Image (cartoon, helix red, strand yellow):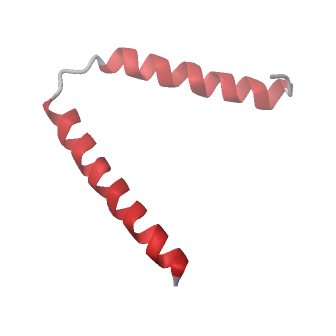
């Protein structure tokens, strides 16, 4: 029961933050090329770590 009392407010807060972030993203003028490049570098780093076992 205590877990439910702790987890439920966290889920509600996370949901509200997600809804607010999506609303802000729709209004914002974002350079999606830069965002995609940034995400690509992160994915490449994890993939190279997985392949080479270094890092």
Locate residue 46: give its quadrant.
Answer: top right
Q: Is residue 41 left or right of residue 5?
A: right
Q: Residue at 80%, 22% (x, y): give it.
A: 55
Name the outermost residue toward the bottom.
1
Name the outermost residue toward the front.
2
Locate residue 31: give its quadrant.
Answer: top left
> Exactly how many numbered labels are in the figure?
0
* Residue in front for this viewpoint, 3 or 50: 3
* Residue in front for this viewpoint, 8 or 26: 8
Locate residue 15: give its quadrant.
Answer: bottom left
21 up-or-down from 11: above or below:
above
Q: Is residue 2 left or right of residue 34?
A: right
Q: Is residue 5 left or right of residue 46?
A: left
Q: Provide residue 23's location: percent of width, then percent of height.
A: 18, 42
Q: Provide residue 1's location: percent of width, then percent of height.
A: 52, 84
Q: Provide residue 50's location: percent of width, then percent of height.
A: 78, 32
Q: Residue at 37%, 54% (x, y): give it.
A: 14
40 up-or-down from 19: above or below:
above
50 up-or-down from 48: above or below:
below
48 up-or-down from 16: above or below:
above
Q: Residue at 33%, 63% (x, y): give it.
A: 12
Q: Residue at 38%, 66% (x, y): give it.
A: 9
Name the outermost residue toward the left.
27
């Amino acid at each position: 029961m205590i877990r439910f009392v702790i987890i439920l407010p966290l889920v509600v807060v996370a949901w509200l933050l997600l809804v607010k972030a999506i609303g802000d993203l729709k209004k914002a003028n974002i350079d999606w090329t830069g965002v995609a490049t940034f995400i690509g570098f992160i994915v490449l780093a994890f993939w190279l770590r997985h392949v080479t076992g270094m890092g």
